[in-house]
Structure formats: structure tokens, C-alpha cells
Image (cartoon, rainbow, N blue to C red):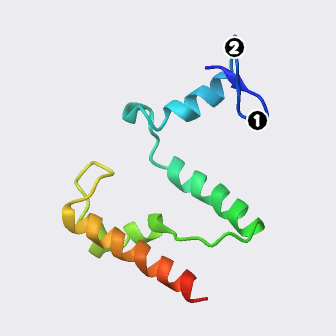
Amino acid sequence: MAATTEQGALVPGTRLPEQHVRARNLFRDAANRIHDDAVKYNEIALRVMKKHEVRIDDLHAFCEQPSVKEKQLPENVHFTDAGYAALGEEVAKQIEAALAK
């Protein structure tokens, strides 16, 4: 994997350290996923978002509710049609609340 400049351009022939490559591949290869990584990533993201005063829609917490979890496919991160509808409604609710301010 090539490195990039500050402007995002690829620098041919450069390589990123292995830990960066693993993190990127983590989302492409389900076999490499570690369940608890989502919690760690969300904690870090929360700190960054709060620091920069970015509004947060915590869909991870929303998806942990039993009424939503029952709409998730077993042993999977995907949802049934009813689950996707519930996610869409939650996102729409958050957008409407943000627009009302």
C-alpha cells in the first residue's frame, strides 16, 4: 500500500507500516475482524467528535437495543428489511432534530 502526501496524492513505491495495513484490511476481511474493536474505535471517534463539536448519531448504541437486535441477521452485521427501515427512521429522526436547531 502506497503512502500519500498531505494533499492525498499517492507517493509511488512507499509502504505503510503493517499496523496501518491491518487496520484498513480489517473492514474488508471479516475473518480479521475483532468484535471488541468496534467499541474501541467508537470511543476514539467519540473523543474526536466531542473535541470538534461534531453532532453524533450513535447507531452502534441504537443497534444494541433488543428491538433492533432482533432485526439483525444472526452472526452477521447486516439487517433484515425491517432492521434497515428502523435504522433509516433513526437517522431521519436525528437529521430532522439537527435541522430544527
Q: Nearer the viewer, residue 20 or 85?
A: 85
Measured as percent of width and height from the top left, residue 92 is found at 41, 76
Extreme residue in the top direction: 13
**Could you say whether the residue bearing mark 1 is in a helix, strand or loop?**
loop
Q: Is residue 70 visible?
A: no
User: What amino acid type is highlighted by mark number 2?
Assistant: Pro
| Residue at image location 79% in from the left, 35% down from the top | 6
User: What amino acid type is highlighted by mark number 1?
Assistant: Gln
Q: CA distance from mark 2 to mark 1?
A: 14 Å
- Look at the image and tell me in which quarter the N terminus lies: top right
In the picture shown, does residue 26 fall above or below 89? above
> Where is residue 67, by image quadrant?
bottom left
| Residue at image location 55% in from the left, 83% down from the top | 99
In the picture shown, does residue 17 fall above or below 24? above
> Where is residue 100, by image quadrant?
bottom right
Report the side of 82 relative to 27 (left or right): left
Measured as percent of width and height from the top left, residue 79 is found at 26, 58
**Could you say whether the residue bearing mark 2 is in a helix, strand or loop?**
loop
* Numbered label attached to residue 94: none
In the picture shown, does residue 20 fall above or below 70? above
Report the side of 27 relative to 49 (left or right): left
How crowded pointer 1 is (Cα within 10 Å; few <14, some 14-19, many 20+) is rated as few
The first of marks 2 and 1 along the sequence is: 1
The residue tagged 2 is 12
In the picture shown, does residue 97 fall above or below 14? below
Measured as percent of width and height from the top left, residue 7 is found at 76, 35
Measured as percent of width and height from the top left, residue 66 is found at 30, 73
| Residue at image location 21% in from the left, 68% down from the top | 82
The residue tagged 1 is 7
Extreme residue in the bottom direction: 100
> Where is residue 19, by image quadrant?
top right
